[in-house]
């Protein structure tokens, strides 16, 4: 019932926006609002593999549309951390796929974030590493191999960010 109510509110918000604005200008703020995100997070909380897979696919689409704010990213990664505990292999693979989108530089679109955003991103990266390590201990070789690949990508992303920040720091000196 909560998922249905939240979904109806999200649809109403999107329809209201659509009727009063040009659909091409659908703002990131509208897409990232609690009203729009809530149904996806609630669907994940139902522990229904089917609903979780559909919800994570929708979240992946949100990540691919436009850069998202770090609070949205952190909320999604928190949900992924919970979903990584499932025994469903399809959900675990979808968690890893979504996780890689969430930690990509394109996700936030901000190469030099403000301090508060940098702290959120740091926490998100640490949670992402935890998720990958958790899934790397899976009995399934497909999950282990995917988690290993995700770990490599996250570590590479961390190294690139450190290198970028060192390069910027050297130019400012």
Image: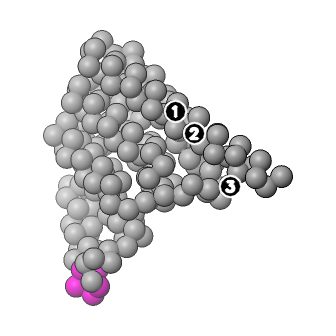
Task: Tell me which residue sits at (16%, 40%) in the image.
Answer: 50
Which mark identifies residue 160? 2
Question: Can see residue 42?
Answer: no
Q: Nearer the viewer, mark 3 or mark 2?
A: 2
Q: State how many labels appear.
A: 3
**Residue 153's spot in the image, x, y percent?**
45, 32
Which residues fall within the magenta stretch?
16-21
Circle 2/circle 1 CB separation < 8 Å: yes
Vertical order, 142 against 41 (above or below): above
Circle 3/circle 1 CB separation < 8 Å: no
> 25 or 130, which is in the foreground?
25
Q: Secondary structure at mark 2?
A: helix
Residue wearing tag 1: 156
Quarter holding residue 6? bottom left
Q: Secondary structure at mark 1?
A: helix
Q: Is residue 140 magenta?
A: no
The disc, 3 or 1, on the residue closer to the chain's N-terminal end is: 3
Q: Secondary structure at mark 3?
A: helix
Residue wearing tag 3: 115
In the rendered structure, the answer to whether residue 12 lies left or right of residue 100 reads left
């Amino acid at each position: 019932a909560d998922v249905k109510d939240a979904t109806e509110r999200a649809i109403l918000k999107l329809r209201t926006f659509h009727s009063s604005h040009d659909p091409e200008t659908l703002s990131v703020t509208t897409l990232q609002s609690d009203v729009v995100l809530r149904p996806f997070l609630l669907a994940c909380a139902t522990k229904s593999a089917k609903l979780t897979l559909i919800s994570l696919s929708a979240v992946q689409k949100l990540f691919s549309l436009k850069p998202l704010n770090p609070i949205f990213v952190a909320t999604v990664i928190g949900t992924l951390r919970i979903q990584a505990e499932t025994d469903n292999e399809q959900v675990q693979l979808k968690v890893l796929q979504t996780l890689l989108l969430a930690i990509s530089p394109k996700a936030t679109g901000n190469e030099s974030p403000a301090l508060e955003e940098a702290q959120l991103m740091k926490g998100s990266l640490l949670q992402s590493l935890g998720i990958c390590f958790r899934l790397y201990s899976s009995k399934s070789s497909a999950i282990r191999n995917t988690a290993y690949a995700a770990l490599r990508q996250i570590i590479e992303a961390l190294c690139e960010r450190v290198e970028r920040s060192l390069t910027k720091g050297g130019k400012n000196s």
